Image (cartoon, grey):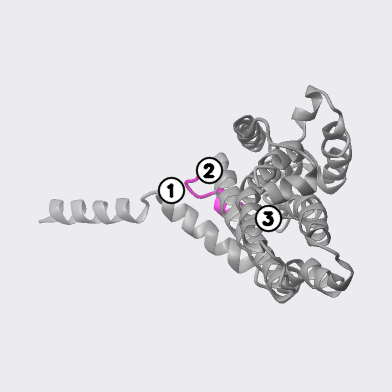
Amino acid sequence: MKAESDSAQDLRMRAATRHPGTWQSLAGLWCLTWRSQLSWRKSLAILLHVMGLPLLGYLRASSFQSMGGWMLFTIDLYTFLALPLFCLHSFGGLVRDDLQEDTACYILTRPIRRWQFLVGQYTCQCLWTCIIVALTYLAFGSMWWLQEVEGWLPVMLGLMSVAVPAILVYGAISSLMGLLTRKYLVLGLIYGCVIEFGVGQIPTNLHSLSMTHHLKDLLALHPEIGAHLVRDSAQPWLSLLMLAMATLISLGVGCLLFTHREYLQAEDMSR
């Protein structure tokens, strides 16, 4: 009887110390992600992000002669300016902010590897960002509908479909910058000016380094957007491949850096 009791107790101890599965870990990180984003201050920032440019475009709608004015607000100002900056702010502090606030120390002592923690955080933040961006595009679509703009629905669906690879690649690059330096906002602005807006405008093969260039190729698959961007999509599959490679490389380098660099005791992680 004593042996059976010891065996049962041993089984209970093993069950209590059993490692969480992948989906359980992701579910926990996702719960932490959305709860941390619903504070009063962050909720107001999200509301401003979702409604800011759509409302400004609606107020300026009387001066728009055609869909070109709306394209300026939706594509030029939001998709290629506000969205990358939003990803830089959200993903740059993906791990660094948690370490500074001592909220990740407990998680990193659990049976979860660092790269799994980083990939989980990245996945949850991508999902949350997709929700915010989808709401923003729906706000733009509502303004277009109120202004009775013709053919707005296909354009909006095209923008929403390209927003997914945009969030993935900008998020991966931003998370890598956040692991490289605590001044990731400055590094991101330098990267955007030099690579995205500088090299991306050079009419040679160098523009392949610009993620904005490949996103424009994907958007050009839609005739209305292609006419606004004044370009044709010659090789959309190549653009998708380049975006996927940039995402995987940035995320892979970030995982290696986070695994082998001790951030908890580094001077740049001090508050």
Which residue type carries mark 1?
Answer: Thr
Above or below residue 145? Residue 211 is above
**Of label 2 and label 1, which has the lower sequence position?**
1
- 60 or 1, nearer to the observer: 60
Does residue 269 appear anywhere in the picture?
Answer: no
Rendered location of residue 57, percent (x, y) = 82, 68
**Quarter of the rendering containing residue 176:** top right
Residues at badges 1 and 3 in contact (C-beta under 8 Å)? no
Disc 1 crowd, CA 10 A, few/some/many (<14, 14-19, 20+): few
Residues at badges 2 and 3 in contact (C-beta under 8 Å)? no
Q: Which mark is drawn over residue 98?
A: 3
**Of label 1 and label 3, which has the lower sequence position?**
1
Q: Marks 2 and 1, Cα distance to the nearest angstrom? A: 9 Å
Q: Which mark is drawn over residue 22?
A: 1
User: For the residues carrying marks 1 and 3, which lies nearer the camera in this image?
Assistant: 1
Q: Residue furthest left?
A: 1
Q: Marks 2 and 3, Cα distance to the nearest angstrom? A: 15 Å
Which region shows up in magenta? 105-113
Q: Please tell me whether mark 2 sits on a helix, a strand or a loop.
A: helix
**Quarter of the rendering containing residue 37:** bottom right
Does residue 220 appear anywhere in the picture?
Answer: yes
